[in-house]
Amino acid sequence: MHSRFESAFAQLPAALQESLAPWLADAHFPAMLSASQVEEVKRHSGLDDEALAFALLPLAAACAQTDISHFNVGAVARGLSGALYFGANMEFTGVAMQQTVHAEQSAITHAWMRGESGLCAITVNYTPCGHCRQFMNELNSGLTLRINLPGRAPSKLGDYLPDAFGPRDLDIKTLIFDAEDHAFALKGEALGDAAIKAANRSHAPYSQSPSGVALQTHDGQIFTGSYAENAAFNPSLPPLQAALNLLSLNGYSWRDIQRASLAEKAQANIVQWDATVATLRAIGCDAVERIELA
């Protein structure tokens, strides 16, 4: 078991510990439960969907990277498939505050990068901030997404974001979790092609500047992130953060990153290169390549 889970795991009910132990024994447990695993855990623990998501929040929060605030937030997103995806806040020392990832963004992007087609609920241990509420309004679930908080009755995103402004107001038809393919050609190298594939999936209807990042670890694993734009612009999530989120949730540390690749348009309205290089250098990775998409 990864050391980050030990304290939280010890506080779980015995039946839940028993059902989760075989999967958590993997140091690179992917911070998610497939639909079949969820059903198995529910049968063994006696918990329903909502209670299970609440019970898993301490494990999700244990994945947080909070060198600045030391305030861990956990989130669990439930996909339309029935799978559950952990999320946690991430902070980066030495770079701009805007590079921070919120727990809700983490869980949502985690599910998106895993290929989910949509979310039906997200469970969080603290009330979502305005930034995250706006980020969630870019999803194809829209204002009907259910939000579960400890000690409160389930509510919908629309209850937390009245008079919302979002992609539908700008006549955007394709939303996050909808299938997208920008059809950029692959070039035949594994890491670079992974970045291009991530760019092809990216959601960039406002800037028309799709981009993707791929990170390779010392043991050869590749983690990718796609750019996710927002109608309010500032809650947009850069592709590097999406890739770092997936890498971290899988139990890898920043020092495990061997090299990185960014794929973006040569003459883009939004350029990710400078921020990507600065953030990677701040966490110890200098081997970064840029692929220009045409």
Image (spheres, rainbow, N blue to C red):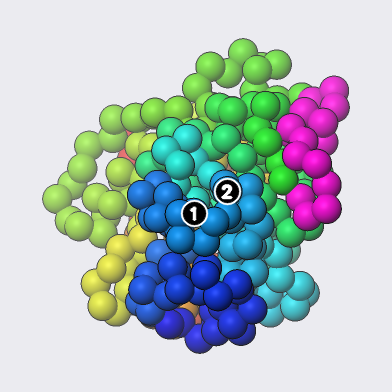
**SS category of the residue bearing label 2:** loop
For badge 1, the amino acid type reads Lys
For badge 2, the amino acid type reads Asp
Quarter of the image where one finds residue 87: bottom right
Q: Which residue is mark 1?
A: 42
> With 2 as the anchor, is 217 left or right in this view?
left
Residue 214 position within the rendered picture, expressed as x and y whole percent measured from the top left = 36, 58
137 and 292: which is toward the camera: 137
Q: Is residue 163 magenta?
A: yes
Q: Which residue is mark 2?
A: 48
Q: Is residue 108 magenta?
A: no
Q: Residue at the location (35% across, 30% down)?
A: 182
200 and 60: which is toward the camera: 60
Up-down relation of residue 127 to residue 121 (above or below):
below
How far apart are the two marked residues, 1 and 2, measured between alpha carbons?
A: 6 Å
Callout 1 touching callout 2 (CB < 8 Å) = yes
> With 100 as the anchor, is 224 left or right in this view?
left
111 and 123: which is toward the camera: 123
Residue 136 position within the rendered picture, expressed as x and y whole percent measured from the top left = 66, 38
Please provide the residue range marked out in magenta.
Answer: 149-164
Residue 35 position within the rendered picture, expressed as x and y whole percent measured from the top left = 40, 47
Image quadrant for the C terminus?
Answer: top left
Q: Residue at the location (60% across, 72% down)?
A: 13
